[in-house]
Image (cartoon, grey):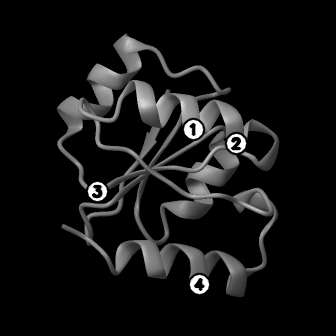
Amino acid sequence: MAWYTNRTTRTLIIVEDQLSAIRASDYVNSVALLGTNLNQERATEIREAGLRPAYLALDKDAWELSVRYAKQYRTYLGLQLLRLDKDIKDMTDEEAGDLLSNVRGVEA
C-alpha cells in the first residue's frame, strides 16, 4: 500500500492506484491498495492509522468487490462507499474537487 497524507483533514479515501491516491491527497488522506485486494492485514493497517471517516472508492469495474469489502469490514473499518463514474486520476480538476470536497465536508 502507498499512503499520502493531507494534514488538514482526518478523512481517508482508499483507492486502487497511486496516481488516484496522489490526486486525492490534495483534498483528503489517501491510500492506494495497488490493486483491488483488501485483506485483513491491510484492513488492520488502515484501522491503526485512525483516520475517519474512511471511504472506499475502487474503480467503476470493481463496484461489486467494493460492496463485498464494505460488508466484510463494516464493523472493523466502517467503510463508506463512493461509486465512481470515472477513476479519480482521470477526473478533471472540477470533478475531483467536487467529489472530494463533498467527502471532506462530512467528517466525523
Q: CA distance from mark 1 to mark 3?
A: 17 Å
Residue at (65, 75) in percent of width and height = 96
Q: Amino acid at mark 2?
A: Trp
Above or below, 65 against 9 in this view is: above
Q: Which numbered disc covers residue 53?
A: 3
Callout 2–callout 3 Cβ contact below 8 Å: no
Q: Nearer the viewer, residue 61 or 41?
A: 61
> Disc 1 vs disc 3: which is toward the camera?
1
User: Label 3: how many residues lie within 10 Å, few (<14), some (14-19) or many (20+)?
Assistant: some
Q: Is residue 54 above or below residue 72?
A: below
Badge 2 or badge 3: first in the primary sequence: 3
Label 4 vs label 1, nearer the camera: 1
For the residues marked 2 and 3, what is the alpha-carbon distance in whole angstroms? 19 Å
Label 1 sits on residue: 67
What secondary structure is found at the residue carrying circle 2?
A: helix
- Relative placement, left or right, of 34 versus 1 is right
Q: What amino acid type is highlighted by mark number 3?
A: Pro
Mark 2 or 3: in front is: 2
Label 2 belongs to which residue? 63
Q: Nearer the viewer, mark 4 or mark 2?
A: 2
